Image: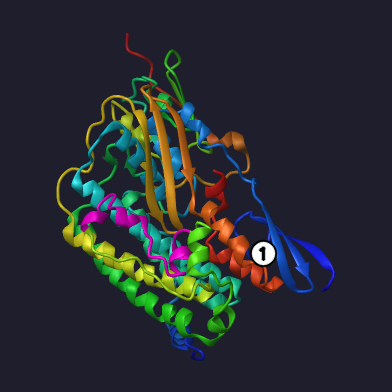
Amino acid sequence: MGERTIIPFGPQHPVLPEPLHLDLILEDEKIVGAVPSIGFIHRGLEKLVEKRDFQEMAFVIERICGICSFIHGQGYVQTIEAVMGVEIPERAKYLRSFWGELSRVHSHLLWLGLMADAFGFESLFMHCWRVREKVLDIFEETTGGRVIFSVCKVGGLWKNVDGDTLRRIGGVLKDVDKDIRPLADVFMRDYTVQKRCVGLGVLTKEEAFQLGAVGPMLRASGVAMDARKLGYAAYGNLEFEPVTENAGDCQARIAVRVREIYQALDIMRQCIEKMPGGEVATTVKGNPQGEYLSRLEQPRGEAVYYGKGNGTKYLDRFRVRTPTFANLIPLLHIIPGCDLADVPLLALTIDPCISCTER
Amino acid sequence: MAFNVIGKTVMKSLFGKPATAMYPVIKNDFYPLTRGAIELDPANCIFCNLCAKRCPTEAIEVSRPDRLWTINRTRCIVCNFCVDVCPRDCLTTVRQYTAPMTDKSAAVITVQGPAKES
């Protein structure tokens, strides 16, 4: 047994865009333990619900995260709508699903790029982000924002997208699909990627389930669990099956995300085909009274939103359980036994979003 | 496992058009919905204070007696809520983003409304 050394990893690290800190306990080059600490970017956004009225809060909640901003906003308004018993128009439901899936494509492409960068494949990283630009352009065209969209409101949406624009976007999505295929091929077949990722950080099906992993992390271990199957927004009317892989290693997590991009593109095509006409917002009267807990599938995994209203325009409590928080524990489980050089890759493999986690 | 799978893509980028626009010769074209900054048309404004009240970040201040409308551009998150609640439709979202600044006081823009007709 070698001498034990503790090496601090993060919160500022060349490979990590997120301020996650790990104290890595090493025996020679092998890691035997990891102690995480977070809390570098707590902003107190949940507390703000006591000071901002419930309609204004939709804009604030969106700013929890810059990647899954749309789904955070959707989670919040969906919770408040359930508390108030508001039924939103069908078109708004389809548009929410559409933008949710667009967020998934954008998030997964971002992650694939970061992953390529983490294992030193910089040209692949740039190509992934080049394709992602097209997705961001669709966001800008339909919502007015590239990162923060501000389209969700309690009772529906602020903005509608007309049929012609949607059909044209359908064409752009075909181009995106065509652009992604050669890059996906690199992730799935290339020697350098395989050499780096196959067999690394294996999480078995039982471990993934028991440790409470969510999202692609869970599905890469063979558990077919996807919160979209609950049928929120328009997902009840759309056809899809959770993407699963069985290996549970880094390569399986890459494969799940790559296949989820295709799935998201397919769901968006279905949304465009099935989208009904009509209004996208309904009038909301009164204030929320009561509580509700809703679950949504973010690109990173399942997020849980809890809201409690007291009959005034200010909420009593709003709580978000983000996917990264759930995935930190499986991360600590897969790190021991690996080499020091593998830690950045393993930390990235959960798609960490510490800004979401700390809010 | 295969070697050099990215080769074809690399060759395409080598001989194809660049993916980025040649800024500043070619400027980025914004979309009609792009939210850049909030502007006020003082002629129609009744200084009702609704925009300031509904602003999630308290970026807008309105003084009814002095007929002044002030916005702090660095506080504003361009969520468009003020534009949607304005009863006189005198607020608009322009497509151009606020220019970067070195002095924070330049972020505070004050608009003086026309004197009230008596």
Is B79 drawn above or below residue A334 in the view shown?
above
Residue that carries the numbered disc 1 in the rendered image:
A14
| Residue A11 visible in the snapshot | no
Is A109 drawn above or below residue A191 in the view shown?
above
How far across and down, in percent of the image, does residue A90 sit? Answer: 19, 47
Residue at 33%, 50% in the rendered image:
A143
Q: Which chain letter goes with mark 1?
A: A
Q: Amino acid at mark 1?
A: Pro
How far across and down, in percent of the image, does residue B66 sit? Answer: 45, 15
Give the tally of numbered discs: 1
Q: Which residues are magenta?
A: A214-237
| Quarter residue A27 falls in | bottom right
**Label 1: which secondary element:** loop
Q: Front-most of A205 and A240?
A: A205
| Quarter residue A107 falls in | bottom left
Q: Front-most of A162 and A278?
A: A278
Q: Residue furthest right?
A: A3
| Residue A277 visible in the snapshot | yes
Q: Front-most of A117 and B38?
A: A117
How far across and down, in percent of the image, does residue A316 sit? Answer: 45, 27
Q: Residue furthest left?
A: A277
- In reply to whether residue A219 is colored magenta, the answer given is yes
The structure's colour scheme is rainbow
Residue at 50%, 76% in the rendered image:
A251
Instruction: State the quadrant of the C terminus of chain A.
Output: top right
Is B88 drawn above or below residue A138 in the view shown?
above
Residue B105 left/right relative to A132 = right
Instruction: State the quadrant of the N terminus of chain A.
Output: bottom right
- In reply to whether residue A200 is colored magenta, the answer given is no
Residue at 51%, 59% in the rendered image:
A210
Count neighbours of disc 1 (C-alpha within 10 A) and say few if under 14, some if 14 to 19, many if 20 or more. Answer: few
Residue B118 left/right relative to B16 = left
